[in-house]
């Protein structure tokens, strides 16, 4: 009797608490965090055992009040009887941020025991393993994540990074075996195809596929400027110097194309010389940031060779900083650049320098997915389509694993 009275009482109060919790969710999504927090607390005052309100309050507190408060809310959700993978996943993330790696590993293990098909939990467990240098385990975890969510770009990107690290740290045969499996499990995924082939070592691609470039830079766009700053990225400055050294361009007189403009790191150096400054890039995410600079007259989301081919005799200066490292064979792109330039127009570019003992090797794709070019090949490819070489210099473009990445900077003109 007492039990049924209790059940009736729960039926009466539960909808109110649930309704309040839903309202709080909507406020939280709208960024009205203080009001949302108050409403979650009201909902919990009505029904202290409403686990979803504890969990969602935990998510809100994570941003608003810190990790300890969030962890307390998630623990309250567990005490309310919600033994859900999601709560352990959330707790594990908070523990990890608080530096409790062992606790975080336990959290992910429980989440995965409750729900073995939880791709995000496999991914985050793999992140933990990666950070502990357990790279084979990390690769296993990412592989599980993308098996569950085959279209998850972040998961594939993480798997690519783990295979790259495995390869660099001397586990090349294991990395190659995993890369081969990755490629055959996901034959239509551009990252599995491009990076997988680079790691297996049998890449036949003349350049990185457009879909790979787009996906890679859309994922990277938000961090790009900070990350490149940390790596001491100098290509835009080196190209600007090379332009000036080969005869300073007239002030505000040139039609300029920033080919593969990315987030627009070259724009400030180019703007003073431009009558018109255009940028083209495959990645919408990168272009969004370029647009925010307010320095370009025209920005186009598209493939640069197609853009060049569609704009004959249009430009006085084409700049390509750190872009031809996504091309192996340079002939088609250089021919298109030549045709897009006006007579006396200049092409200024950087490539990563291939330092390989095999003299017959003209370019090679690395396990990170970028191509490096032999200097002699770069020279020959420019001259072959009709360019006159004005300047060629070698310099450090940025750091990678603490070591400088050496590049070749070329200035060529259309006679
Ligand atoms: C390493 S970022 C360099 C961006 C910029 N030039 C800079 O120096 O900061 C390479 C850029 O080239 C773009 N890219 C690579 N291949 C391309 C192609 N075929 N067509 C258009 N954009 C391309 C990528 O989307 C990316 O934004």
Image: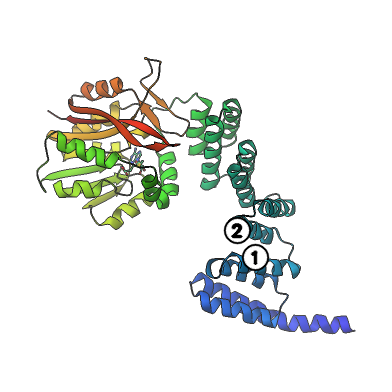
The residue mark sitting in front, 1 or 2, is 2
Q: Is residue 311 visible?
A: no
| Colouring mode (rainbow / by chain / secondary structure / one colour) | rainbow
Q: Quadrant of residue 355?
A: top left
Instruction: Say the numbered circle drawn on residue 105.
Output: none
Ligand 1 quadrant assignment: top left
Q: Up-down: is 383 above or below 294?
A: above
Helix, strand, or loop for circle 1?
A: helix
Q: Up-down: is 2 above or below 60?
A: below
Q: Please provide percent x and percent y for residue 52.
A: 66, 70
Q: Please provide percent x and percent y for residue 84.
A: 71, 61
In the rendered image, the quadrant that contains the N terminus is bottom right
- Residue at 27% across / 42% down in the picture? 236
- Residue at 67% across / 62% down in the picture? 87
Q: Nearer the viewer, residue 64 or 101?
A: 101
Residue position marked by numbered label 1 in the rendering: 71
How far is the residue under mark 1 from the one under mark 2? 10 Å
Q: Is residue 169 left or right of residue 250?
A: right
Q: Quadrant of residue 19?
A: bottom right
Marks 1 and 2 close (CB-CB < 8 Å): yes
Residue count near mark 1 (Cα–Cα under 10 Å), binned few <14, some 14–19, many ≥20? many
Helix, strand, or loop for circle 2?
A: loop
Q: Please provide percent x and percent y for residue 105.
A: 68, 50
Q: Is residue 5 left or right of residue 238?
A: right
Q: State how many labels appear.
A: 2
- Residue at 40% across / 15% down in the picture? 358
Residue position marked by numbered label 2 in the rendering: 98
Q: Please provide percent x and percent y for residue 389.
A: 18, 26
Earlier sequence position, callout 1 versus callout 2: 1
Q: Nearer the viewer, residue 299 or 359?
A: 359
Q: Is residue 172 left or right of residue 318?
A: right
Q: Nearer the viewer, residue 336 or 169?
A: 169
């Amino acid at each position: 009797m007492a039990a049924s009275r209790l059940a009736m009482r729960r039926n009466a109060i539960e909808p109110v608490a649930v309704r309040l919790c839903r309202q709080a969710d909507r406020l939280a999504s709208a960024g009205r965090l203080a009001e949302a927090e108050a409403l979650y607390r009201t909902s919990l005052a009505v029904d202290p055992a409403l686990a979803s309100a504890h969990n969602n309050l935990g998510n809100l507190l994570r941003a608003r009040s810190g990790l300890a408060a969030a962890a307390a809310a998630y623990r309250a959700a567990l005490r309310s009887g919600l033994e859900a993978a999601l709560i352990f996943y959330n707790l594990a993330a908070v523990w990890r941020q608080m530096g409790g790696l062992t606790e975080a590993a336990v959290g992910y293990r429980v989440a995965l025991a409750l729900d073995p098909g939880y791709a995000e939990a496999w991914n985050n467990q793999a992140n933990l393993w990666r950070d502990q240098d357990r790279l084979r385990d990390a690769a296993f975890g990412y592989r599980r994540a993308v098996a569950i969510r085959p279209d998850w770009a972040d998961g594939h990107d993480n798997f690519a990074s783990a295979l790259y690290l495995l390869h660099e740290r001397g586990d090349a045969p294991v990395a190659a075996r995993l890369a081969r499996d990755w490629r055959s499990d996901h034959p239509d995924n551009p990252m599995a195809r491009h990076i997988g082939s680079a790691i297996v070592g049998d890449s036949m691609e003349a350049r990185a596929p457009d879909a790979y470039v787009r996906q890679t830079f859309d994922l990277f766009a938000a961090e790009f400027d900070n990350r490149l700053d940390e790596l001491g990225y100098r290509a835009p400055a080196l190209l600007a110097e090379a332009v000036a050294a080969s005869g300073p361009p007239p002030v505000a007189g040139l039609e300029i194309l920033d080919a593969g403009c990315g987030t627009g790191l070259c724009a400030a150096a180019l703007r003073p010389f431009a009558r018109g400054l255009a940028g083209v890039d495959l990645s919408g995410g990168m272009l969004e940031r370029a647009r925010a600079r307010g320095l370009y007259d025209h920005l186009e989301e598209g493939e640069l060779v197609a853009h060049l081919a569609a704009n004959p005799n249009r430009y006085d200066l084409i700049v390509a900083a750190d872009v031809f490292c996504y091309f192996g064979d340079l002939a088609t792109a250089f021919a298109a650049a030549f045709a897009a330039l006006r007579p006396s127009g200049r092409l200024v570019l950087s490539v990563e320098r291939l330092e390989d003992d095999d003299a017959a090797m003209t370019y090679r794709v690395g396990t990170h997915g970028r191509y490096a070019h032999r200097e002699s090949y770069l020279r020959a490819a420019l001259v072959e389509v009709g360019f006159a070489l004005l300047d060629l210099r070698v310099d450090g473009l940025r750091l990678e694993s603490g070591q400088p990445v050496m590049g070749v900077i070329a200035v060529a003109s259309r006679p």
